[in-house]
């Protein structure tokens, strides 16, 4: 059938290359920057904006900056940032007024913290459970002893002074007595409830023994010089506040979130009131409260360290925010999960620990990290109640007579911003990484 | 056989009570009440004890005593002879001032950045992303210090200035703007404005009902324009121009002490307010931008496609389909940010802007009334957040998606 007037192509025509204007660098530029007149105008404006911001910034921080020198003359001569000042004060920014000969202790704590975090954060490294137990149980005690010098004076207080003078011996007698009472109570309760008395006693005794070891560790004199928390400063205070706040607010937040979803009206009401009060007020009033009002609430003669008071305030404040984040996760778990756990015969705490919380916490990782980041940024507020954190130390040094110059302050702030940014941005990036890693199970 | 053994072990009667969930719940709750009550009583008795030792009688009587300190910015009459109560009130008004201004500016900037982040222009989107990442990841207090101590201290001194179009001026004393001076009949303009707004609301509802009837909206924007802008302007000229502007007067020559801006001329915005406002606006705008971006992206692509296939133009799609649905997602977290901004304005104390916390701190230092002052702070901030939540919950119920 050969009709010469009909032409049917027998083979596929070779593919034409894409138009030059849509591929390569030129194509990318065209679609992303110059697709229309309006877009072109925007691009040019954006370029002008970038040039007008980036060029002076680079000039100020790098080109015109002073990198070395002594005293304020070096800074006065500078047209740009005065990094010589930051270099001179760097030890203060890191350690505050911690005695120079004792700074190895801070270094050791920093190293342990960094090592622990790396071991926990890199997924490929095994033995997460052991590391976590170490970081939560051993590290805080070691850090406390190293940073303060240990030798906490425990002298008891249950037995009146005229019966037995205050001493470590009295404390341990009292501790033993309290333990005995607790063990007896637990045994009675276990017997009443029909649980295994031996196992209850074993568990409680283990917990009390661990507590005893901790108390012994913080009270025994290890021969380290005592360093007042008033001498702590810089990154040390920032990290102490941030890390304690983060670790303390997690369990508190979980408890509050569970309390808010509890069936017991009193528990629910107490949780709601606690959460909403803390969330309704600014952190600065909480810190003021902990610094001026808390002493009024304590029996006369009892004083609590200023840093510790701030820690309590920050932890309580953050736990309210954490509770709301975790509640979001709890609400997102389908009812079927709760019901299935119940049907398997799990008790409330077993259900929460093994079924609900692992799923809920995984869901709210972004929220938890977000609240960690805001906590880290909020640690700067402690400078208002007179603690010298990283920013407080920089703020204080910028006005010191030896380095005062028009660019000293701005150099310090840029340095501070850079450091805080690294921490916060790092946290958010790591959160994104974890989220993507854990997300796989939910992708369909 | 297993089927014969159905009785099981003998039931222990004593364990039934502890295993009864109702009894256990009751037990835990009573225990909680006892513990909380005990802590509360302990705190109360300790506080009374300590206050007695300090010779302080709890109560608000001290609020009527003379404050004796000056406040650098007050929108109401205040002098050193005023009472503590008045001083705290000035602080509250200053807090509200910075909060309202901050909310307005941060919303504008935040929407701009949020939309820029979704721009098809790669460069614009990247700039917006950089803005968000920089300002969200540095502490607000640091930003306040940066603007106040580093930027606003390096502007010209009191005897020189930077000017913008000859209207706004900046030097180390703050920002100088024209100040409106209201004449005796200026109230009439306000009445005209209110009346215009009221009538145009009525016109809007009439227009809405017409649209339902006819299927096409009547053209009402000229009416709105005439009512809201035209009417007050008309009244302004009719009653003889009662509003004038006091321009800031700058003396460049003359005796050294008289150089600089003349006192009482123009409107002076103190640098503390400028710095705080800059930091709050820029910081909160980064969060609002993320909220706006998430809200717009939450409107599914199908919605825009459906709108296009119905024949709506891109502008109409945005205005009638995307924005109303995005707002539903945006508003709740946006309110949260407004509250955050209000609470964050308490950082004013770090640069001595006289807000509620700052003034309260001064009063606290002078009188030692820690409990009362902290109580005032908490009551005010809690009141503000409860008020906002009530309004927002009502709003949320109205716009919430009604499903099935």
Image: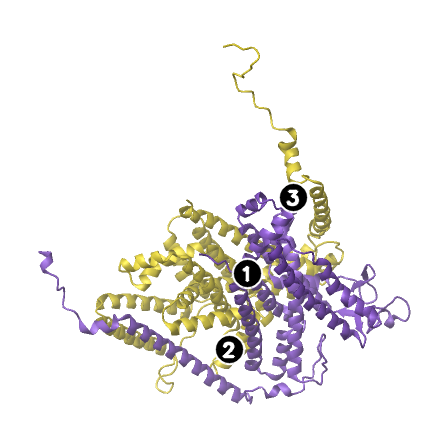
- What colour scheme does the image use? by chain
Q: Residue at x 25, y 75 (%)?
A: A184
Q: The chain shown in yellow is which? A: A
Image location (x, y in percent) of residue B202: 66, 66
Nearer-the-camera pick, A237 or A243:
A243
Q: The chain shown in purple is which? A: B
Image location (x, y in percent) of residue A217: 39, 67
In the displayed structure, would residue A30 be above or below residue B313? Answer: above
**Cα–Cα span, label 2 and label 3:** 54 Å
How many numbered marks have been drawn onto this rendered protein structure?
3
Image location (x, y in percent) of residue B59: 56, 87
**Cα–Cα span, label 2 and label 1:** 33 Å
Which of the 4 image quarters holds residue A335? bottom left
- Dot 3 alpha-carbon crowd within 10 angstroms: few under 14, some 14 to 19, many 20 or more: many
* Label 3: which secondary element: loop
Q: Are marks 2 and 3 on the same chain?
A: no
Residue annotated with mark 2: A294
Nearer-the-camera pick, B387 or B337:
B387
- Dot 1 alpha-carbon crowd within 10 angstroms: few under 14, some 14 to 19, many 20 or more: some
Return the chain for callout 1. B
Q: Residue at x 56, y 72 (%)?
A: B387
* Label 2: which secondary element: helix
Q: Which mark is residue B121?
A: 3
Q: Which mark is residue B333?
A: 1
* Label 1: which secondary element: helix
Return the chain for callout 3. B
């Amino acid at each position: 059938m050969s009709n010469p007037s009909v032409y049917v192509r027998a083979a596929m025509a070779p593919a034409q290359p894409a138009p030059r204007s849509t591929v390569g660098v030129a194509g990318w530029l065209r679609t992303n920057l110059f697709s229309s007149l309006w877009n072109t105008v925007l691009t040019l404006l954006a370029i002008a904006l970038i040039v007008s911001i980036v060029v002076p910034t680079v000039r100020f921080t790098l080109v015109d900056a002073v990198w070395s020198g002594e005293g304020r003359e070096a800074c006065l001569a500078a047209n740009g940032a005065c990094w010589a000042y930051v270099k001179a004060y760097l030890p203060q920014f890191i350690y505050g007024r911690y005695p120079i000969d004792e700074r190895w202790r801070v270094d050791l704590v920093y190293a342990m913290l960094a090592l622990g975090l790396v071991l926990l954060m890199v997924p490929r490294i095994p033995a997460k459970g052991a590391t976590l137990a170490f970081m939560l149980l051993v590290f805080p005690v070691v850090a406390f002893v190293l940073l303060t010098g240990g030798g906490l004076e425990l002298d008891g207080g249950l037995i009146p002074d005229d019966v037995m003078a205050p001493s470590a011996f009295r404390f341990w007698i009292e501790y033993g007595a309290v333990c005995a009472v607790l063990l007896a109570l637990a045994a009675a309760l276990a017997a009443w409830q029909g649980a295994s008395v031996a196992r209850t006693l074993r568990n409680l005794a283990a917990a009390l023994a661990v507590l005893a070891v901790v108390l012994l560790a913080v009270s025994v004199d290890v021969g380290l010089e005592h360093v007042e928390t008033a001498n702590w400063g810089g990154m040390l205070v920032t990290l102490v506040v941030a890390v304690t706040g983060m670790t303390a607010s997690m369990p508190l937040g979980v408890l509050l979130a569970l309390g808010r979803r509890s069936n017991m009206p009193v528990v629910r009401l107490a949780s709601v009131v606690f959460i909403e009060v803390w969330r309704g007020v600014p952190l600065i009033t909480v810190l003021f409260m902990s610094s001026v009002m808390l002493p009024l609430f304590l029996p006369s003669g009892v004083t609590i360290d200023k840093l510790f008071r701030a820690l309590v305030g920050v932890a309580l404040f953050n736990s309210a925010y954490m509770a709301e984040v975790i509640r979001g996760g709890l609400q997102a778990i389908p009812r079927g999960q709760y019901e299935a756990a119940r049907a398997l015969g799990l008790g409330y705490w077993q259900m929460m620990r093994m079924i609900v919380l692992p799923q809920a916490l995984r869901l709210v990782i972004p929220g938890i990290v977000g609240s960690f980041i805001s906590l880290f940024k909020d640690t700067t507020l402690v400078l208002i109640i007179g603690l010298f954190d990283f920013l407080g130390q920089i703020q204080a040094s910028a006005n010191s007579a030896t380095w005062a110059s028009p660019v000293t302050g701005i150099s310090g702030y840029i340095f501070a911003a850079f450091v805080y940014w690294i921490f916060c941005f790092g946290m958010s990036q790591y959160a994104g990484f974890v989220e993507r890693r854990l997300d796989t199970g939910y992708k369909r | 056989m297993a089927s014969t053994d159905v009785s099981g072990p003998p039931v222990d009667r004593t364990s039934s009570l502890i295993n009864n969930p109702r009894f256990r719940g009751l037990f835990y709750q009573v225990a909680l009440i006892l513990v909380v009550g005990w802590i509360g009583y302990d705190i109360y008795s300790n506080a009374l004890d300590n206050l007695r030792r300090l010779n302080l009688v709890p109560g608000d009587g001290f609020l009527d005593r003379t404050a004796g300190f000056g406040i650098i910015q007050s929108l109401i009459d205040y002098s050193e002879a005023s009472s503590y109560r008045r001083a705290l009130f000035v602080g509250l008004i200053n807090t509200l001032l910075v909060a309202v201004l901050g909310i307005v500016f941060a919303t504008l900037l935040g929407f701009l950045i949020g939309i820029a982040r979704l721009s098809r222009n790669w460069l614009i989107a990247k700039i917006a992303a950089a803005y968000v990442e920089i300002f969200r990841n540095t502490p607000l207090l640091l930003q306040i210090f940066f603007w106040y101590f580093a930027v606003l201290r390096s502007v010209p001194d009191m005897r020189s200035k930077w000017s913008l179009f000859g209207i706004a001026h900046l030097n180390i004393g703050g920002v100088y703007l024209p100040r409106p001076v209201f004449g005796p009949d200026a109230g009439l303009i306000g009445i005209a404005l209110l009346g215009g707004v009221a009538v145009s609301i009525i016109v809007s509802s009439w227009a809405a009902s017409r649209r339902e009837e006819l299927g096409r909206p009547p053209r009402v924007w000229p009416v709105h324009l005439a009512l809201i802008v035209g009417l007050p302007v008309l009244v302004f000229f009719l009653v003889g121009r009662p509003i004038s502007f006091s321009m800031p007067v700058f003396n460049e020559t003359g005796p050294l002490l008289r150089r600089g801006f003349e006192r009482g001329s123009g409107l002076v915005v103190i640098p503390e307010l400028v710095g705080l406002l800059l930091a709050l606006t820029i910081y909160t705008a980064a969060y609002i931008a993320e909220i706006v971006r998430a809200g717009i992206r939450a409107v599914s692509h199908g919605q825009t496609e459906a709108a296009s296939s119905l024949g709506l133009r891109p502008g109409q799609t945005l205005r009638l389909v995307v924005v109303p649905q995005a707002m539903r997602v945006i508003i709740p977290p946006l309110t949260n940010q407004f509250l955050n901004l209000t609470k964050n304005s308490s950082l004013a104390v770090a640069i001595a802007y006289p807000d509620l916390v700052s003034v309260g701190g001064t009063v606290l230092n002078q009188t030692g009334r820690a409990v009362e002052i902290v109580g005032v702070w908490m009551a005010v901030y809690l009141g503000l957040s409860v008020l906002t939540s009530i309004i927002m919950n009502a709003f949320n119920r109205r716009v919430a998606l009604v499903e099935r």
